[in-house]
Image (cartoon, rainbow, N blue to C red):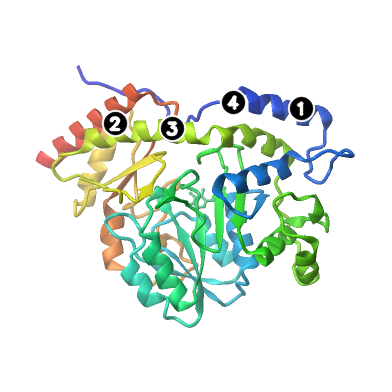
Amino acid sequence: MTERFTGSFTQQEPIPEEGIEAALAVLRHGRLHRYNTAPGETAETALLEQEFAELVGAKYCLAVASGGYALGCALRAVGVKPGDRVLTNAFTLAPVPGAIAALGAEPVFVGVTESLTIDLADLAEKVCDPRAKVLMLSHMRGHLCDMDRLMKICTAAGVTVIEDCAHTMGAAWDGVPSGRHGRVGCYSTQTYKHANSGEGGLLVTDDEEVAARAIILSGSYMLYERHLAAPGPEVFERVKYHTPNVSGRMDNLRAAILRPQLRALEGQVARWNARYALVEDGLRGVPGLTVIERDPRGRFVGSSIQFLLLDWAPSRVRTVLERCAARGVELKWFGGGEPVGFTSRYDSWRYVEAPPMPLTDRVLRGIVDMRLPLTFSEDDCALIARIIRAEVGAVYQS
Ligand SMILES: *Cc1c(COP(=O)(O)O)cnc(C)c1O
């Protein structure tokens, strides 16, 4: 009998009851706007910011409308101007170069290694460009590079680091939460990330002026004193007349949904990683398939898994994808000629003039990617691994 998987790769868990109750309370009182508070009331959004700052050990936190908004806001808050170059990963997703391009700045792509992390040798060369003063580092699919080395390279070159932690909320490098190495950390609470408010984002920093500028940028209408994870009013006095309003606030409904999820994050990370380990173990030792080894200094969140079919002919990779799909296993491939869903590549973003990167192309052509939603049971994960194992093996031998 041929085993088939019947679960959905896009189905997340329901919102916890506590979050539903909190959301209903907001709907019942009607004060959804973060600055619409009754006398003596503290908005859900302000509480969320305070709690997230505490969770990652940051001085300041701002909740915003999306992860992509957080990235753009961070770029503006650290002073990126039109025409500036911003270094970023060649292996990332469209909102990252998009945030840079939206400012009129120019993305400069840095390569990816077989560990799926940023190529630090390539970075060390590219930080020498005097027009590139910022690195927007995308911890793509939760693969953390050697953050100590990366920060050394960037600090020595005077390059400011903004971290895109869309896939690393709950992760850490050497005990330091992801998003806390650079000047700013940006997170997404969009449905497919590690906390789900439909859309949403969070930004953290210890830099008081960056925090004040980000809050004004997000559309605080000079009501910044209602923030709990913000610098004092004297800092806002310094920046408020020089910072435009680029509205992108979070609202109290989403904040209410998120607060209980953040309290449960630790436990969710353990559940994700148990599922990840089962799939990873099931894929070990398959000829032609490379499992991505993780640096033990990094604590990751296994909400998705990647493996490499390195140097395979494209037609054979496509056959693997088709055979797995026929058995209910949805794999995505970063090697296709056209972007499909989220699998776009640096050469799909044709608004950027990007020179070819042969070493990076070789890795991208091999990357196969799969979501691991928490609605999958551990038995599901073992089954999925058996299916991939069998199909990769069959194509490899044919
Ligand atoms: C999802 C995502 C973002 C942006 O998040 P949105 O909330 O969808 O705007 C940024 N970077 C990466 C790598 C992502 O996957």
Q: Considering only order in the chain, which callout, 2 or 4, is on the residue closer to the N terminus?
A: 4
Residue 278: mark: 2
Q: Considering only order in the chain, which callout, 3 or 1, is on the residue closer to the N terminus?
A: 1
What is the spatial separation of the Cα atoms under label 4 and label 2, in whole angstroms?
Answer: 25 Å
Mark 3 is on which residue type?
Answer: Pro
What is the spatial separation of the Cα atoms under label 2 and label 1, in whole angstroms?
Answer: 40 Å
In the rendered image, which residue does mark 3 sit on?
373
Mark 4 is on which residue type?
Answer: Pro
Q: Say which element carries label 3.
A: loop
Mark 1 is on which residue type?
Answer: Ala
Mark 2 is on which residue type?
Answer: Leu
Q: Considering only order in the chain, which callout, 1 or 2, is on the residue closer to the N terminus?
A: 1
- The number of discs equals 4
Q: Residue furthest top?
A: 1
Q: Is residue 306 left or right of residue 189?
A: left
In the rendered image, which residue does mark 4 sit on?
16
Q: Considering only order in the chain, which callout, 3 or 4, is on the residue closer to the N terminus?
A: 4
Q: Considering only order in the chain, which callout, 4 or 1, is on the residue closer to the N terminus?
A: 4
The location of residue 45, given as percent across then percent down, is 72, 43
